[in-house]
Image: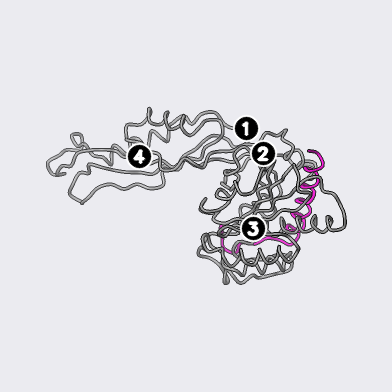
Amino acid sequence: MLERLARYVSIRSISREEGRLADTVTADLAAAGLHVERVGNNVWCESGDARRPRLLLNSHLDTVPPGSGWTGDPWTPRIDGDRLTGLGANDAKGCVVAMMEAVLRVQASLARGERLGGTIVLALTAEEELSGQGLGTIVPRLGPLDAALVGEPTSLVPMIAQRGLLVLKGRAAGRTAHPANTPPDQAANAIIAALRDIMRLAEFDWGPAHPLLGRTHANVTRIAGGVANNVIPDSCEFVVDVRTTPIESHAALVARLRAALDCELSVHSDRLVPVETRPDEPIVQACLRALPGAVPAGSPAMSDMVFLAGVPAVKIGPGDTRRSHTPDEYVLGSELAAGAAAFERMIREFLRST
């Protein structure tokens, strides 16, 4: 698995540039006797008994661009003992390799005459880091799905809930005037108006805490206003990044915010909703049987789990989320081995119990 991961890490696959890696993954799966389908840079195949239940295993081929601080070339994998360092090794090519290994092991057992009791759908997809032309665009092509495992580095902790993302734009209005002729207490200054609303956001009641995710929270990430040093601004705009929970819908939260703020508030993006899988779902119980002692948790980070509405899903995989998007990102061979074994057990536990 380390050798396969080293090959995959060496192939540049920044979001929207996954083509060469998709070619390689397609060839590797086809060489194992699997019939591979592809749309864009999304690759998928099936293994099993061609009947229900159907379990999706999904992870993503793309990476973010490398930031500063790398001590070597991000696309030249470095193996030091059990550690493989390279861009995407942890997020999420390690998960890709571990899922592939689990599926190939199952495929080998089928070739020996074993009956699986269901079907595995392995989908290795693009543009997860952008929420772009990836899993969300091919779900209808994958056929009916009864459950899903979404491969992300969670240290093999089963994540059954994740936050959503709501991006809002606020626009405060004022009136232009000359600063020399306008005392501050008489100015209709749009920047001051925007700052008042931003302070209201700091005191806003975001609602009760979710048991796994905590409270919804927000950060102002951009602000712009003014046209010249000597003109009181008549407009100021700011962007609010809101990380939501399943307790309140995006529409209801926006309505409450509009009532609390004076500015004009518009929705820039609300499609990435929070998701949650009930602990008693068969896929969650299969994960817990496969990983004795594991405790379901919630994930603050986004993933393609958001595109699986109506499909009970668990986000889980080898590696550590704290290494993602960092210089000298790495994964351990022991983590890959544990991940592949865990995925295989989850597959068998789910298909055996449903």
Residue 211: which disc?
Answer: 1
Residue 74 position within the rendered picture, expressed as x and y whole percent measured from the top left: 57, 68
Q: From the image, tell me which residue sits under label 4.
A: 170
Vertical order, 185 against 103 (above or below): above
What separation in Å lies between label 2 and label 1 (alpha carbons)? 18 Å
Give 294 or 195, whichever is nearer the viewer.
Answer: 294
Q: From the image, tell me which residue sits under label 2.
A: 312
Q: Residues within 10 Å of mark 4 (few under 14, many from 20)?
A: many
What separation in Å lies between label 2 and label 4 (alpha carbons)? 35 Å
- Give the quadrant of the N terminus: bottom right
Number of the front mark, 2 or 4: 2
Q: Amino acid at mark 2?
A: Pro
Q: Which residues are magenta?
A: 325-354
Q: Amino acid at mark 1?
A: Pro
Residue 100 position within the rendered picture, expressed as x and y whole percent measured from the top left: 72, 58
In the image, is residue 338 part of the stretch drawn in magenta?
Answer: yes
Q: Amino acid at mark 3?
A: Glu
Q: Main secondary structure of the magenta part?
A: helix
